[in-house]
Amino acid sequence: MVLTLAEKVTYRMRQIGVLGRTATLSIRNNDLTHSSHSITTQTAIDNAEDFAKMCMQIFDKHWKANTPYAIRAVRVSLSNLERADTARQINLFDYNKNEKLKKLNESLDKIRDKYGYYAVRRAKTIERDFINYYEADEEEAEAD
């Protein structure tokens, strides 16, 4: 679920040309209590993998051991934004990885722009992708 949400957020961020540093994960429990936590990185990001990893770190730290209850809703966001076209410091050792991810994201974005957001998905999200399943049905109904 977190990876699916992270993909949607980062896709929209790339569309408007921004990067984010602060990942926030908010969870609403079945008793309707709500809590939210965030972490900030030194390097701004716009790819779903890094964003989802940050969110899962938050989940592991704050909720995983303390969840005898059911989770009702999950919300993710990236804040502390900066323009993508400005110069930024990158990690020297992650340069090749970042370039590959940038090319992958550009390719995915082109496919989604041409054929619709749901034309391509990650294999990890297919089995239990309730969000995309529901929204794809709405998108098809609007097209008819």
Image (cartoon, rainbow, N blue to C red):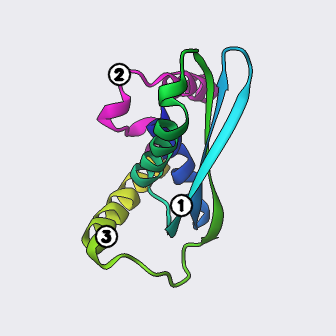
Secondary element type, mark 2: loop
5 w.r.t. 28: above or below: below
Residue positioned most to the bottom: 87
Confirm whether the magenta stretch covers residue 126: yes
| Image quadrant occupied by the C terminus | top right
Using the image, determine if residue 128 lies above or below residue 55: above
The CA distance from mark 2 to mark 1 is 26 Å
Image depth: mark 1 or mark 3 in front: 3
Q: Quadrant of residue 115?
A: top left
Mark 1 surroundings: few (<14), some (14-19) or many (≥20) residues within 10 A: some
Amino acid at circle 1 = Arg
Of residue 83 and residue 52, the one placed in the foreground of this image is: 52
Mostly what secondary structure, the magenta segment?
A: helix
- Identify residue for label 3: 99
Q: In the rendered structure, does residue 52 fall within the stretch colored magenta?
A: no
Q: Identify the magenta region.
A: 115-144
Q: Position of residue 120 (x, y in %)?
A: 37, 40
Visible in this render: residue 32? yes
Under mark 2, the amino acid is: Glu
Taking the spot 66% from the left edge, 21% from the top edge, the residue there is 29
Left or right of residue 87, residue 53 in this image: left
Percent across and percent down for residue 100 are: 28, 64
Q: Nearer the viewer, residue 68 or 24?
A: 68
- Under circle 3, the secondary element is helix
Q: Identify the mark nearer the N-term, 2 or 3.
A: 3
Q: Which mark is residue 127?
A: 2
* Measured Cα–Cα span from mark 1 to mark 3: 15 Å
- Which amino acid type corresponds to the residue marked 3 in the rendered image? Glu
Which of the pair 61/90 is nearer the observer? 61
Residue matched to label 1:
14
